[in-house]
């Protein structure tokens, strides 16, 4: 076997070879197309460094996991304080998990109080769905078209992109979808009287950073309660200051029955997630000795993870990161709209706080007609990746496209980002759009492997 000391000395090629041979070889090929297989060896705040000494600005932020930045010393120091404690002891009550549960009840909206800790966002969603079903005695769950809630079977059944679902059917039954931002469609489905819960992202992340109309979330909450369903807020990506408030549902004064949280709960340092619910829902679901063990997990609430969670919440509140995210996000969105007016390649700028999406226009004209629409299809699938590739490889800015809409690149850096770093991204985008007037031109400059397949796609 390869020892840890040996592993830390491996070069980029060796790491790529290991992943190709023993990991996800398809992903190795996909990332290699745009030179996204660099070996990163150091990270601090918004900055990361590769094995060749090059510095990058991380504007991907672990898909919202790094609100406090990479390796924040306050969280690292907190972990050192508990290094001698047992990490998990099943025949006891983990002391620090109780503390984090208390702190979450203090900062979450409405009457949310009881927490169940897990390890990933998808696990939080699974727990929320089970809680909704057992608490209401109903079975149906509603989600929205274009949503993303995870890829475990229950969460996948609610995720709104067919590409991820089709290979794994049949999925969990009685999981229905309604259009996002459509209260009429939601009410029609709720009227059947069989819905346990409606789960929704306050802003659709992987759907392309889609911000709903003001009043949509509040209206959805009221409809749920009118028809006896629970309102479940999936704040896994939007939570902990990302959108300019501690939780995005607060923009619409929503008080969820259940909330799902993960990602930046630990500052991106330890795997941790939680679903938190009201006393009424918890008592109906798991509030007796007979029911208290119906939903369990081995690593949930372990000492290291909840310690990182406690420290992360302290940082977010003490450093007023939601306020900083709102101010810096307003500036970034304003300047991105200036670029939109300047370049026809940008279709729309969307977002709130430091959760921002940049959507691109699709090709039009003779070349697209000649290709039978293949150019448009290729652009829809690859243009976001090409822009992200140029940002990283030419300008040292790490971004990525959104999973359900690859024609959108996301900008969600740590909430500690400063104006100088934001301005570097804006200048880099300006240079990219100035020198690449179309998808075709960008594809030619970026990679031959994409352009060679454009006219052969079906």
Image: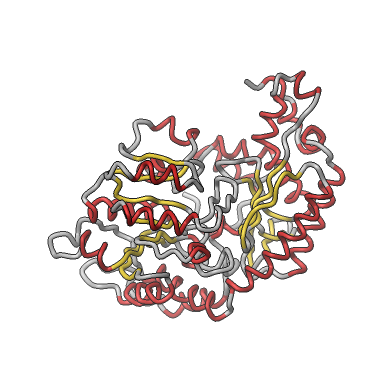
Name the residue nearer the viewer: 290 or 322: 322
Q: Quadrant of residue 376?
A: top right
Name the residue nearer the viewer: 436 or 259: 259
Name the residue nearer the viewer: 94 or 365: 365
In the image, 150: left or right of 348? left
Instruction: Examine the rendered structure and indicate whether residue 380 appears above or below residue 2.
Output: above
* Residue displayed at 70% across by 60% down: 57
Instruction: Examine the rendered structure and indicate whether residue 333 appears above or below residue 26.
Output: below
Residue 146 x %, y %: 51, 42
* Colouring of the image: secondary structure
Residue 317 x %, y %: 52, 78
Residue 28 x %, y %: 59, 39
Q: Quadrant of residue 189?
A: top left
Can residue 254 be spotted in the picture? yes
Residue 452 x %, y %: 74, 25
In the image, 350: left or right of 336? left
* Residue displayed at 35% across by 35% down: 171
* Residue displayed at 30% across by 43% down: 140
Quadrant into which the C terminus falls: top right
Instruction: Examine the rendered structure and indicate whether residue 383 appears above or below residue 430.
Output: above
* Residue displayed at 75% across by 28% down: 451
Number of numbered discs: 0
In the image, 237: left or right of 395? left
Name the residue nearer the viewer: 134 or 458: 134
Q: Residue furthest right?
A: 435
Can residue 264 be spotted in the picture? no
């Amino acid at each position: 076997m390869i020892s840890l000391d040996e592993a830390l000395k491996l070069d980029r090629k060796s790491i790529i070879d290991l992943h190709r041979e023993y990991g996800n070889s398809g992903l190795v090929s996909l990332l290699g197309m745009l030179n996204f297989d660099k070996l990163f060896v150091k990270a601090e705040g918004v900055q990361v460094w590769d094995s060749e000494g090059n510095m990058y600005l991380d504007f991907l932020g672990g898909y919202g996991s790094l609100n406090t930045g990479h390796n924040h010393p306050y969280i690292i120091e907190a972990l050192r304080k508990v290094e001698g404690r047992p990490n998990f002891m099943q025949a006891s009550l983990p002391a620090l998990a109780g503390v984090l549960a208390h702190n979450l009840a203090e900062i979450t909206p409405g009457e949310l109080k009881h927490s169940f800790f897990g390890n990933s966002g998808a696990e939080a969603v699974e727990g929320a769905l089970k809680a909704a079903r057992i608490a209401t005695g109903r079975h149906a769950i509603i989600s929205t078209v274009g949503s993303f809630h995870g890829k475990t079977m229950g969460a996948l059944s609610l995720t709104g992109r067919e590409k991820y679902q089709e290979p794994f059917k049949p999925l969990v039954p009685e999981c229905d979808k309604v259009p996002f931002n459509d209260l009429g469609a939601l009410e029609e489905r709720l009227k059947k009287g069989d819905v346990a819960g409606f789960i929704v992202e306050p802003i659709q992340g992987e759907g392309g950073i889609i911000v709903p109309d003001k009043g949509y979330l509040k209206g959805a909450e009221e409809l749920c309660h009118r028809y006896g369903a629970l309102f479940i807020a999936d704040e896994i990506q939007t939570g902990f200051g990302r959108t300019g408030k501690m939780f995005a549902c607060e923009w619409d004064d929503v008080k969820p029955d259940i909330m799902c949280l993960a990602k930046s709960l630990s500052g991106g340092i330890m795997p941790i997630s939680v679903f938190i619910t009201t006393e009424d829902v918890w008592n109906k679901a798991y509030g007796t000795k007979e029911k208290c063990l119906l939903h369990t997990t081995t690593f949930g609430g372990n000492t290291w993870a909840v310690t990182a969670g406690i420290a992360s919440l302290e940082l977010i509140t003490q450093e007023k990161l939601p306020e900083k995210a709102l101010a810096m996000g307003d500036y970034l969105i304003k300047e991105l709209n200036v670029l939109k007016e300047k370049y026809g390649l940008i279709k729309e700028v969307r977002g709130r706080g430091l959760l921002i999406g940049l959507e691109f226009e699709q090709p039009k004209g003779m070349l697209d007609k000649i290709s039978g629409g293949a150019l448009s299809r290729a652009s829809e699938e690859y243009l976001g990746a090409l822009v992200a590739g140029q940002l990283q490889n030419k300008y040292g800015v790490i971004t990525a496209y959104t999973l359900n809409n690859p024609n959108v690149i996301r900008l969600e850096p740590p909430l500690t980002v400063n104006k100088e770093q934001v301005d570097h991204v804006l200048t880099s985008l300006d240079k990219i759009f100035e020198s690449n007037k179309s998808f075709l031109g960008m594809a030619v400059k970026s990679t031959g492997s994409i352009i060679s397949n454009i006219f052969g796609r079906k």
